[in-house]
């Protein structure tokens, strides 16, 4: 399989971001990302005005971020051609996205903060809203804002990448719980706006430049075809990227701690290989294998929300004998680095 690295969830001037859509894509190309997904609030103007295309080696796809009339239940909708009314309920737009052939991810599900009155939290409130494709397990902007205090304000603004530690445990727990009944895919988002905020009373600071956030939370996808090939149309490339996000053949990394390209987590049953997002029938035992790109790190195996085993090294083999939904977390120098999607092992 081929691996491509993308950055998901960002806003341009078409909603409340400060950058032009094409400029954002050019910056992603400079940083070396393979794809980005633009998600302006309740609008697909960038799609209808022709911004969805390649910019050098970076493909910019255009989705949008939907919300309800209370501005809650933010939902990242991809592969749709039209937006929906903000008078709809979360349940209604989840269904509409699905019915029109799109996929959708709950954005910043457990956002909670009180540091800035003008930026209240936008948590997900309706967990019975139907079949969303997945959830954003790690959102740069949410975590950064939650960690903000009067005391650390200055450091936080100066070191936006260093202040990101790990996905909220609450979100990981919810994600594992949801996976007990059906596949719910985890992705990472940056939620970049590049807002200009008056921080210290007199200086305006851009929080954060797109370029900085493109180096933080990334979503890596595994696909069957080479994306930058003359034989593939834009539609076929989109099918590959969205297919991977839909099926869960993807993982999330914090690039600030190291380039995670090359990470693999798969199940081996005899000669057969099963990737993240796949289901495997168990006979008596299955080997789960982890390969890291370069560094020795701590690999934690989690099943149904519980830590099962920890291995240190560049590789890890776990022999499992019980059904469940297995995923791994990788810590580099005790810093949260990589979060895989689940492999489902069934009786
Ligand atoms: Zn949002
Ligand atoms: Zn957003």
Image: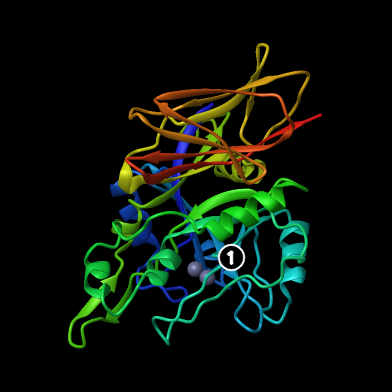
Q: In the image, is residue 274 above or below residue 344?
A: above
Position in image of residue 169 (x %, y %): 53, 57
Quadrant in the rendering for residue 201? bottom left
Residue count near mark 1 (Cα–Cα under 10 Å), binned few <14, some 14–19, many ≥20: many
Q: Secondary structure at mark 1?
A: loop
Q: In the image, is residue 193 above or below residue 326?
A: below
Nearest the viewer among 14 and 153 is 153
The residue located at (39%, 37%) in the rendering is 260
Position in image of residue 191 (x %, y %): 45, 64
Position in image of residue 158 (x %, y %): 21, 66
The quarter of the picture where the N terminus appears is top right
Any atom of ligand 1 within 8 Å of the CB at mark 1? no
The residue located at (63%, 48%) in the rendering is 185
Quadrant in the rendering for residue 293? top left
Quadrant in the rendering for residue 166? bottom left
Q: Is residue 41 left or right of residue 25?
A: right
Q: In the image, is residue 155 above or below residue 115?
A: above
Residue receiving disc 1: 109
Nearest the viewer among 233 and 35 is 35
Nearest the viewer among 190 and 330 is 330
Q: In the image, is residue 94 above or below residue 177?
A: below
The residue located at (72%, 68%) in the rendering is 93
Q: Is residue 198 left or right of residue 247?
A: left
In the image as oriented, which residue stretches furthest toward the left? 202
Q: Is residue 62 visible?
A: yes
């Amino acid at each position: 399989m081929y691996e491509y690295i993308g950055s998901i969830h960002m806003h341009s001037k078409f909603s409340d971001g400060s950058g032009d859509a094409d400029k954002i894509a050019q910056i992603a190309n400079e940083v070396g990302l393979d794809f980005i997904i633009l998600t302006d609030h309740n609008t697909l103007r960038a799609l209808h005005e022709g911004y969805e295309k390649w910019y050098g080696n970076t493909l910019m796809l255009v989705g949008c971020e939907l919300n309800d009339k209370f501005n809650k239940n933010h939902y990242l909708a991809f592969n749709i051609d039209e937006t929906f009314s903000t008078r709809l309920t979360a349940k209604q737009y989840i269904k509409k996205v699905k019915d029109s052939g799109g996929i959708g991810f709950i954005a910043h599900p457990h956002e909670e903060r009180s540091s800035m009155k003008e930026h209240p939290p936008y948590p997900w409130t309706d967990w019975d809203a139907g079949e969303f494709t997945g959830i954003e397990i790690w959102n740069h902007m949410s975590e950064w804002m939650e960690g903000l205090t009067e005391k650390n304000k200055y450091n936080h603004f100066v070191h936006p990448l260093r202040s990101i530690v790990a996905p909220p445990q609450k979100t990981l727990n919810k994600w594992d719980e949801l996976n007990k009944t059906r596949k719910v895919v985890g992705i990472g988002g940056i939620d970049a706006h590049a807002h200009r905020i008056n921080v210290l009373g007199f200086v305006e600071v851009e929080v954060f430049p797109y370029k900085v956030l493109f180096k933080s939370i990334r979503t890596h996808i595994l696909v069957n075809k080479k994306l930058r090939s003359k034989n593939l149309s834009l539609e076929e490339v989109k099918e590959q990227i969205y297919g991977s996000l839909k099926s869960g053949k993807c993982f999330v990394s914090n690039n600030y701690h190291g380039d995670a390209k090359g990470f693999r987590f798969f199940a081996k049953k005899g000669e057969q290989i099963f990737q993240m997002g796949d289901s495997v029938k168990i006979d008596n035992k299955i080997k789960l294998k982890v390969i890291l790109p370069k560094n020795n790190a701590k690999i934690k195996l989690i099943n149904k929300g519980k830590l099962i085993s920890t291995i240190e090294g560049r590789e890890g083999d776990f022999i499992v004998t019980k059904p469940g939904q297995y995923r791994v977390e990788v810590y580099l120098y005790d810093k949260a680095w990589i979060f895989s999607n689940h492999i489902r092992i069934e009786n």
